[in-house]
Amino acid sequence: MKFIGFVGSLRKDSYNRKLMMAVAGIVPPEISFEFIEIGDVPMFNADMEANFPPAALAVKEKIRAADAVIIATPEFNRTVPAALKNITEWASRPYGDNAFAGKKVMVMGTSTGNISTALAQYDLKKILLYLNAKLLGQPEIMIATAQTKFDVAGALTDEGTKTFLAKSLSEFISFVHNG
C-alpha cells in the first residue's frame, strides 16, 4: 500500500512538518510513505489549466496514485493556509478530473495554541468532503501546545502524543483497508 503526506505550511521548521515526520517514522514497513513538497506549485489560475503547470501535475499524479493521503495543516488566521488550499484547487481541476475523488484522507494538525488547528481542520474537511474524499472522522488529531511536544532537533518527545499518533495511524490504516 502507498501513502503520501504533505503539510500546509511551507516553513522548513514548522511544527506540522515535524508532526508529519513523526507519523512517517511510525508507518509500518508494509506501507510505503512519501512526503510531498508543495511549495513549488504556482498559485491556482484557471487561465493556466490548458497548460497545466508541471509542479501542480506532479502533485496531482501523486495524489491519484496513492492509496491514501495524510495532510497536516497549520491554522493561519483561523483557516487553512493558502498553499494547502492551492493544492486542493489544482488537484481538482480541470472540472471532472478530481484526484481527491474517493481518496482516503486523514487530516491532522498541531499549533502552539490551546485549540490547536480545530478551525483549519474544519475548513479543510469541508473542502475535501466537497471533493468527494473519504475522510477518517475519528480520531481527530489536533495536537495543542506543540512547543512542548518536540525537541530542538524536531523529534516528537511527548510520550502521550506518540501513543496517540500510533493509535490514530492504526485507525487510519484500518479505515483504508476496510472503509
Image: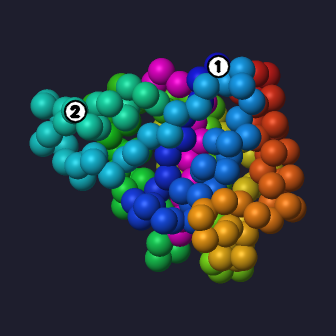
Please tell me whether mark 2 sits on a helix, a strand or a loop: helix
| Residue position for label 1 | 1
- Residue bearing the label numbered 2: 54
Residue 148 visible, this angle: yes
Residue 177 percent coordinates (x, y) = 76, 22
- Check disc 1 and report its element: helix, strand or loop: loop
Q: Residues within 10 Å of mark 2 (few under 14, many from 20)?
A: few
Instruction: Indicate the quadrant containing the N terminus: top left, top right, bottom left or bottom right.
Output: top right
Q: Residues within 10 Å of mark 1 (few under 14, many from 20)?
A: few
Q: Percent from the top left, x then y, of residue 149?
A: 73, 69
Which numbered disc covers residue 111?
none
Instruction: Give 77 or 154, whichever is nearer the viewer.
Output: 154
Picture quadrant where residue 48 is located: top left
Give the residue type that dot 1 points to.
Answer: Met
Query: Does the segment drawn in magenta span residue 8?
Result: no
Q: Which range of residues does the magenta coloring cover?
A: 64-75
Q: In the rendered view, would you say 84 is above or below 53?
A: below
Q: For residue 16, which quarter of the picture?
A: bottom right
